[in-house]
Image (cartoon, rainbow, N blue to C red):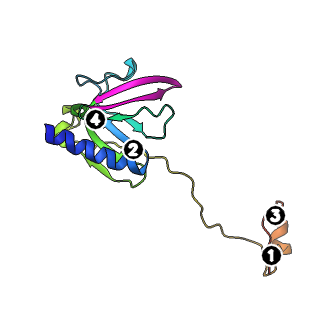
Amino acid sequence: MEDHASEKKERLLAALDSGMVMVHLDARRPGVVVPAHLARMAHLHLNLSYNFPGRDLTVDGWGIRSTLSFSGQKFRVSIPWTALFGICSHVSHEEWLFPDDLPAELAGMPIPVPPIRRRAGLRAVALRGLDGEGNGSSSDQDSVPRCRDHLRLIK
């Protein structure tokens, strides 16, 4: 089991160096400390980051310890390596699954991974009703409400 723990630790640390990470764990395993309402979950997923307030994330040979927020309340969690069965990077979107540590209820089933919230990025927007000068054409002005322009075409 020591080799498993060292591999989990290595992968988690590498993912944390890139940014936020979601860990998947069996909250019922011995040594897990989470809020009481989550302690019976076979598949609990928590986000971890070096940038969270408090910055007390500890990753060592035993496992993971950090103060996290649950419904606005801070709680110090402890996760031994034996309870952790999955790691997902929010940044690289890489995922690692440790099937030997899956809870019996999840063995052989696809693991439901909650969607990772991505920051809104820029996207292309088609401009309708603009002529070569950056002015709206009269037919489009009638059908599309005009907003005050924030960007101007500079020649």
Quick one: SS at disc 3?
loop
Q: What residue type is labelled 2?
A: Val
Q: Which mark is residue 21?
A: 2
Q: Which of marks 2 and 1 is in front?
A: 2
Q: Decide: few, some or many residues near mark 2? Use Cα within 10 Å; few <14, some 14-19, many ≥20.
A: many
Q: Earlier in the sequence, mark 1 or mark 3?
A: 1
> Do the numbered discs 3 and 4 sit on residues whose CB atoms are within 8 Å?
no
Tell me if 62 is positioned left or right of 151 in this view.
left
Q: Earlier in the sequence, mark 3 or mark 4?
A: 4
Q: Decide: few, some or many residues near mark 4? Use Cα within 10 Å; few <14, some 14-19, many ≥20.
A: some
Q: Distance between the residues labelled 2 and 3?
A: 40 Å
Residue behind mark 1: 134
Q: Where 149 sits versus 64, above or below?
A: below
Q: Which residue is drawn at 61% across and 67% down?
A: 124
Whether the magenta-drawn stretch holds residue 65 is answered as yes
Q: Which of marks 2 and 4 is in front?
A: 4
Q: In which quarter of the image is the N terminus?
A: top left
* Front residue of 14 and 46: 14
Residue behind mark 4: 60
Q: Decide: few, some or many residues near mark 1? Use Cα within 10 Å; few <14, some 14-19, many ≥20.
A: few
**Range of residues picked out in magenta:** 63-79
> Do the numbered discs 2 and 3 sit on residues whose CB atoms are within 8 Å?
no
Quick one: SS at disc 1?
loop
> Do the numbered discs 1 and 3 sit on residues whose CB atoms are within 8 Å?
no
Q: What residue type is labelled 1?
A: Gly
Q: Which amino acid does label 4 sit on?
A: Asp
